[in-house]
Image (spheres, rainbow, N blue to C red):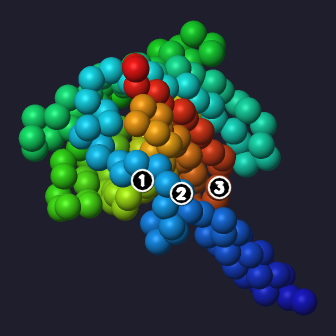
Amino acid sequence: MPRLTRLALVAAALALAACAGRPSLDAPSMGGPDLALEEFFAGRTTAWGQFQDRFGEVRRRFRVEVEGSWDGAALTLVEDFVYDDGATERRVWTLRKTGPTTWTGTAPGVVGEATGEVRGDTFNWRYVIDLPETSGGFRAEFDDWMWRLSEDRLLNRAYVSRFGVDLGEVIIFFERPA
C-alpha cells in the first residue's frame, strides 16, 4: 500500500476516533433537575477536578472557588484555581444568554467567543483558549459537557484537543453550599 494511502487511512481513523463516544444534547435526560446556569452559579460554588491525558494518566488536580453573579443580562463567573503543585490561576468568564437555551461567553485567553446550549439538565460549552504557561502554554479546543445531578451538584467533563487530536479530559465536580 502506498505511503500516502496509509497516511490518509490513519488520518481518517484519527478523525473518526475523535468524534466517537461524545455526549449528545439529544440524549434523554437522566432525571436531574433542569439546569439554569444563572441560578446554579449564583453565589459561591466550590469545585474539584483533574486533567487526565489521552492515556488515562492523571496529570494535574485542582480546586476551584467560583463566585457567580447574574445581573439579568450577563452571568459573571470569577474562578480561582489552586493546583496540586501550588500554582494559582484566576479566570473571569462573562456569559450572555442569547436565546432561551443558548449562551455565548468570553474570558481572557479565549479566542473569539465560547458558545453553548442548555437542554434540560445538560449544558454543552465549546471554546478555544490560549492556556497559561502553568497549564501548558498552548492553544487548545474545549468541548465541555455539564450535567446537573441534583439541586446543589453538577458534573463537568471537558474533552480537550489540539489541531483535532485528543489530548485528554478534564473532570470537575461542582457543589453549592447547602
> Where does residue 166 sit, x and y in percent of width and height?
65, 55
Q: Which mark is residue 166?
A: 3
Q: Which mark is residue 175?
A: none
Q: Which type of secondary structure does the marked residue at label 2 adopt?
A: loop
Q: Which residue is drawn at 63% across and 35% down?
A: 51
Packing grade of label 1 (10 A; few <14, some 14-19, many >=20) is: many
- Expressed as whole percent of the image width and height from the top left, the position of residue 164 reads 58, 62
3D distance between C-alphas at marks 3 and 1: 26 Å
Mark 2 → mark 1, Cα distance in angstroms: 8 Å
Amino acid marked by disc 1: Asp
Residue that carries the numbered disc 2 in the rendered image: 30
Which residue is situated farthest in the left direction here? 72
Along the polypeptide, which appears first: circle 3 or circle 2?
2
Q: Are marks 2 and 1 in contact (CB under 8 Å)?
A: yes
Categorize mark 3 by other alpha carbons within 10 Å: few (<14), some (14-19), many (20+): some
Query: Compared to 39, does 83 lie above or below?
Result: above
Q: Residue furthest bottom?
A: 1
The circle on residue 121 is: 1
Amino acid type of the residue tagged 2 in the rendering = Met
- Label located before the other in sequence (3 or 1): 1
Instruction: Classify 10 Å Cα crowding around label 2: few (below 14), some (14-19), many (20 and above).
Output: few
Let me know if residue 124 appears in the view: yes
Front: mark 3 or 2: 2
Is residue 108 shown left or right of residue 51? left
Residue 140 position, x and y percent, is 50, 48
Please state if 102 lies on the left or on the right of 109 as rendered.
left
Question: What residue occupies the far top of the structure in this picture?
Answer: 86
Rendered location of residue 95, percent (x, y)? 23, 44
Q: Quadrant of the N terminus?
A: bottom right
Going by the numbered disc 3, the residue's amino acid type is Asp
Q: In which quarter of the image is residue 8?
A: bottom right
Contact between labelled residues 1 and 3, with CB atoms less than 8 Å apart: no
